Amino acid sequence: MTLDANIVYVGKSALNLYLLLCLGLKSPTLLKLTCDSELKIQDFKFLQEILPLLGARLAPLEPHGNLLPAKLEASGILPSRVELPVNTPVEFATALIACGPLYEKDLSILLPPSLANHRDIIRIVDVVARFRPETTIDGDTIYLRAAGFSMPSSPVIPDMDPALAGLMLALPYVAGGNIRLQGHWPSDHPLDGPTRELLLDFGLAPIFLPDAVYSSCETRLYPSRLDITNLTEELLPLATALAFASGKNTTIVCNTSRDDIGHSRDFLHHVGAEYQISTQGIHVSGIRPGKAEVWASPSPAWTLALSLVSFQQPGVCLSNPGIISEVWPSFWNIFTSLPEGPPPHAPTQIREEANEPEPVAGSGKRRIRI
């Protein structure tokens, strides 16, 4: 496949743009790139600095506009080593690492300090190494071997993100039934144990298999205390959503001076929760009268948290649905087709018969208004 002499629409995704740019670097290429209006207003000036280091340049097609739409002019002559500028986004570094083995010669990438231990960098290096075992990371340098990918004899199952997968595994707590996630659960991940414990605290029963995870909730539990003091911010969305969804008095014990506590406070306020924040933690005690307010989610994890509580508090309103679509494009199609859950705070019933009909969705209030 060649990108030369083509016009490609990259949509709203900056990652799509970076992947196409990095794919175009491997050979002499003249490629026109168009995009959605959201990308046109973003600042891509760093590309004017980094692409010349890789034997290419990006020329705007609109003289008085921003950088996009643009024309990529690539020589196909790449250095053996490139030092990424300090302002390089992690998405661009990820795209360059993913495309590196497709180039004609080996490439070493020196990362800026902000990206040296970034989890997305570590994750993409792990994925690429499954196809090119010679791919290595040494401190702040990535070493990529050229000559394409060697396909493994058995399918490569990507690792799940425990923080995001944990939110999906909590779905039976609010919607009943069960859920199956295809993929590999990383048992060596730092969030493995804490995520399992948090799910078990609410009566969820995850079953971990080599290529999938099942979750159900035969008996809902209502813990009065959740201690996440020593956990990273990644599990706060799950703890906050489950505490609210339980409908009981629950205290999330945590350091409330953490920066991400503001996200939890905003979330609880906008979904209509009764709550208090003290030096001991976050105390959630029920639902206050009134209509839920419009909310802008700060991350995909918080959007999934909102999706969970929408079964208990239908009609919540989200102003930025695209934040989850960027990492899971089909999410909203799947979510809106889910059947209605049990009445708020009602015990969850598990359907035993495989051929028992599913309840019909859409009979009541929309769970999330966009």
Image (tube, grey):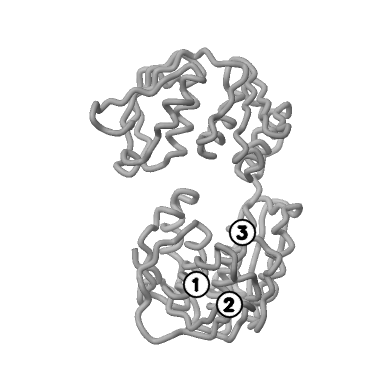
Q: Which residue is drawn at 50% across and 63% down?
A: 302
Q: Distance between the residues labelled 3 and 1?
A: 19 Å
What residue did someone put label 3 on? 163
Q: Which residue is drawn at 33% across and 36% down?
A: 35
Q: Percent position (x, y) of residue 161?
A: 62, 53
Q: How far apart are marks 2 and 3 (CA)?
A: 20 Å
Q: Percent position (x, y) of residue 317?
A: 36, 68
Q: Is residue 339 left or right of residue 162?
A: left
- In this rendering, the answer to whether 2 lies above or below 189 is above
Q: Which is closer to the viewer, label 2 or label 3? A: 2
Disc 1 packing (10 Å; few <14; some 14–19; many ≥20): some
Residue nearest the viewer, comparing 275 with 219: 275
Q: Distance between the residues labelled 1 and 2?
A: 8 Å
* Labelled pair 1, 2 in contact (Cβ < 8 Å): yes
Q: Give the quarter of the image for residue 137.
A: top right
Q: Give the quarter of the image for residue 122.
A: top right
Q: Earlier in the sequence, mark 3 or mark 1?
A: 3
Residue 265: mark: 1
Q: Residue at x 46, y 55 (%)?
A: 324
Q: What's under tag 1, amino acid-wise?
A: Arg
Q: What's under tag 2, amino acid-wise?
A: Ile
What residue did someone put label 2 on? 282
Q: In which quarter of the image is the C terminus?
A: bottom left
Q: Give the quarter of the image for residue 167.
A: bottom right
Toward the right, the furthest residue is: 188
Badge 2 marks a residue whose secondary structure is: strand
